[in-house]
Amino acid sequence: MKGILILAHGSKRLETERIVNSLVEKVKSKTGETLVYPAFLQFSDQNLEKGVDYLVKEGADHIRIMPMFLFDGVHVTQDIPNELETIKARYPGVEIKMAAHIGDDDRIADIIVDRVNSI
């Protein structure tokens, strides 16, 4: 069974969790996948490790981590991969892969143009 973990940086502002939870529901709707779960690197108990634990407990044996980051800074290039190596060792029968971060995507430019044109 496939699981998707949407991983955001996190914030002290509760708005962050509301937005990520909304995106989780949108991804479920667009993909038809039921095991889509939010997680945060900082400022939340709902972290990467607990997110993977939850998905495995719910039956996921193929987990895709989607890092919600524009840039491939230290979190994307080091922190997340290092933490995933530790998590993978606990679940040798589970395939866990990280998708590319959001990065330089034409769809982001479309959002910027839409927002600028709306003011």
Image (cartoon, rainbow, N blue to C red):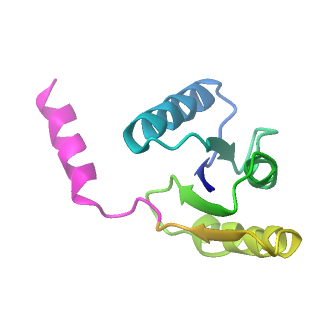
**Stretch of the chain drawn in magenta:** 101-119
How many marks do you count on the picture?
0
Residue 72 is left or right of residue 58, and the answer is left
Relative placement, left or right, of 2 versus 26 is right
Q: Quadrant of the N terminus?
A: bottom right
Residue 112 on image: x %, y %: 23, 43
Q: Is residue 107 above or below residue 74?
A: above
- Residue 54 appears at what percent x and percent y? 78, 46
What is the magenta segment's predominant secondary structure? helix
Q: Is residue 103 above or below residue 81?
A: above
Q: Position of residue 102 (x, y in %)?
A: 41, 59
Toward which corner of the image does residue 117 lie, by quadrant? top left
Q: Compared with residue 117, is residue 64 higher up or lower down, i.e. above or below?
A: below
Residue at 85% across, 76% down = 89
Q: Quadrant of the C terminus?
A: top left
Decide which of 61, 81 is in the foreground and name it.
Answer: 61
In terms of depth relative to the viewer, which is nearer, 98 or 105? 98
- Residue pictured at 62% horizontal, 30% vertical: 17
Q: Quadrant of residue 15?
A: top right
- Judge whether residue 118 is colored magenta: yes
Q: Position of residue 10 (x, y in %)?
A: 65, 42
Q: Quadrant of residue 12?
A: top right
Residue located at (55% from left, 57% from top): 67
Q: From the viewer's perspective, is 4 left or right of 84? A: left
Which residue ends up furthest to the left in the rendered image?
117
| Nearer-the-camera pick, 36 or 34 | 34
Is residue 67 inside the magenta stretch? no
